[in-house]
Image (cartoon, helix red, strand yellow):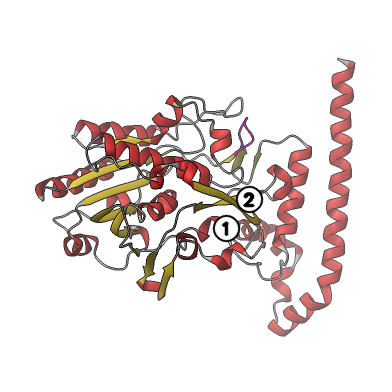
Amino acid sequence: MREKVKKIAKRANSATVLACLFVAFICVVGAARLPHVASELGALGRWREYTFEYFVETVDDIYAEMLTTSSDVPLLHNRGTYIELNGLIARTLGQRTMNDVTKLKNGLLFSFSGTMDVSVPIERMTQLFAAQEERGAQFLFVMAPLKVSKYDPQVPTGSVSVDNDSADELVNALRDNGVAVLDLRERMYEQGIDHGEAFYVTDHHWRTETALWAFAELMHEMTATGVIPHVDTPVTDVASYELRPSGVEFLGSRGRRTGRFFAGTDEMNLIIPRFDTQLTMEIPSRGIYNSGSFYDVAYDQELLTDADLYNNYAYSSIGYADNGLTLWRNDDALFDRRVMLIGDSFGNLPFALLSLVFSDCDEVDVRHLDEDFWSLYDATEPQLVIVFIGAASPNQKNTTLVSRAEG
């Protein structure tokens, strides 16, 4: 009992010291900024707005904006420093939750989202499957995992996660409707893959190594179900790819709300084929056209040189992030086939790798698509459609689309 009291007292003393340091820091920063702030406020005639009363009323809104914006909030510069001091204090005090982000038992950062209505995704995905079937074409729905495993959630004591429930409902309903489904959550469990090793600590995405594994599983599934014939090729062998460190440290979507001291930072490995590749990639909406090897074409090189933790996101370098329409063309692909790839950012790397398999891949993210989806679908006449989404968001524009009748 005495040791427990000492431990609590020691933590309390640490908290007191940190609190004093934090207040001192704010004072120093505030003093340094005072002439500039006074000049700005005086010029704008806004002294009344920055009284103590106004500060008390709006500080929560300012802090919330600081957590969500990609740049400094006016009059609150160097926002990352404030977040990191907060994260350091939270870690020292042993807190597992900060700014709506929870540190799981395996150390990963996670934001609980709860359940959502998937009745519309069930209807629309079944409709898209039926459209393919009517044309004598193929369809495959792929569910990527989220950081909390439904088999071993790793949530802190007192927390409960239902985040997989909606994904389960969607998968089960699609299977009941005759839709071919590849549930990668099941494959990870069957193969004993640890979620703690499969995901970035500070981001909601899986590691590129896990995305490469998912690509190999997708190829295995398509071969086993007769979508494509078996081909003995290095393209489907994960050992045929180099894991090259990007050299860029980054904070993911969850880490930007907690800072580097709460759970650390991440670094992404680039997936580079060890065999020769030659392809093109075009993003019409952004005027981007690349031609060359997979490495030259598939990665946004600018995002691999900037180490700004709060304004640069290395994961977005894959396929140049999320775009409404990306056109991949490869005359040397394994199969001469028109494929439509629909999905969110979990599919970015698997979709890019599929350009080594199929000659004509149209990658679609309906969340950012400017044109009507069904018009694009009819114009493309895909021989194969693959929908690839993360289990955290089973109800999204990539699954709700718009009904065929409405379109």
Residue under numbered circle 2 = 267
Q: Which residues are magenta?
A: 103-108
Residue 76 x/y as whole percent? 71, 66
Q: Is residue 100 above or below residue 273?
A: above
Name the amino acid, label 2: Glu
**Secondary-structure class at tag 1:** helix
Residue 331 x/y as whole percent? 30, 62
Residue under numbered circle 1 = 314
Q: Quadrant of the N terminus?
A: top right
Q: Between residues 360 and 20, which one lies in front from this camera angle? A: 360
- Res 344 visible: no
Residue at coordinates 40% horizontally, 55% vertically from top-left?
352
Q: Residue 303 lies in what quarter of the image?
A: bottom right
Name the amino acid, label 1: Ala
- Mark 2, Cα crowd under 10 Å, few <14 / some 14-19 / many 20+, is some
Residue 35 x/y as whole percent? 83, 77
Q: Main secondary structure of the magenta part?
A: loop
Marked residue nearer the N-terminal end (2 or 1): 2
